[in-house]
């Protein structure tokens, strides 16, 4: 049952991550979608690891929510104002933590 839930969540996350990518340069990118874009490799040009490595690097303290936000800013996906929004950064951090708790280990 746990495996089914994890698989279902992974599929859902993958599907949901495609939506903002189809819209070139989304300035209203939610924290959830930001983490999924990063997980799916759309921010690798900015030093953000993808797939299992994202969770691993987060657990090791080598990548943070602020790093993901900065990468999205650098890629013109969100406004630079977002870097000052602590609620947004905390939400990104929670979603990064959720990747880890889903068993997405590198």
Image: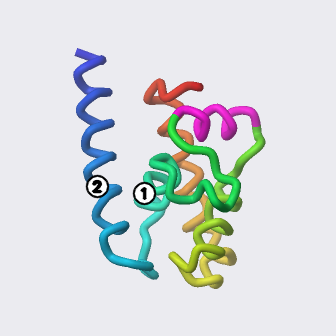
**Which residue sits at x=31%, y=58%?**
18
**Which residue sits at x=28%, y=28%?**
7
The residue where tag 1 is placed is: 32
Q: Nearer the viewer, residue 53 or 58?
A: 53
Residue 13 painted magenta:
no
Above or below for 103 versus 50? above
Residue 100 in picture, x, y percent from top left: 54, 32
Residue 3's quadrant in the figure? top left
The colour scheme of the drawn protein is rainbow
Check if mark 2's residue and mark 1's residue have beta carbons within 8 Å: yes
The residue where tag 2 is placed is: 16
Residue 96's quadrant in the figure? top right
Q: Is residue 11 left or right of residue 90?
A: left
**Which residue sits at x=43%, y=72%?**
29
Residue 59 painted magenta:
yes
Residue 78 in picture, x, y percent from top left: 53, 78
Badge 2 or badge 1: first in the primary sequence: 2
Span colored in magenta: 52-60
- Which quadrant, please, contains the C terminus? top right
In terms of secondary structure, where does tag 1 sit? Answer: helix
From the image, give the main secondary structure of the stretch colored magenta: helix
Residue 32 in picture, x, y percent from top left: 42, 57
Which class describes the residues within 10 Å of circle 2: few (<14), some (14-19), or many (20+)?
Answer: some
């Amino acid at each position: 049952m746990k495996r089914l839930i994890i698989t279902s969540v992974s599929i859902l996350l993958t599907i949901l991550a495609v939506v903002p990518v189809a819209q070139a340069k989304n300035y209203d990118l939610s924290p959830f979608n930001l983490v999924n874009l990063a997980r799916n490799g759309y921010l690798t040009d900015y030093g953000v690891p993808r797939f299992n490595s994202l969770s691993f690097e987060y657990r090791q303290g080598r990548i943070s929510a602020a790093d993901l936000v900065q990468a999205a800013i650098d890629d013109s996906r969100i406004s630079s104002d977002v870097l000052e929004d602590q609620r947004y950064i905390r939400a990104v951090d929670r979603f990064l933590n959720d990747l880890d708790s889903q068993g997405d280990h590198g």
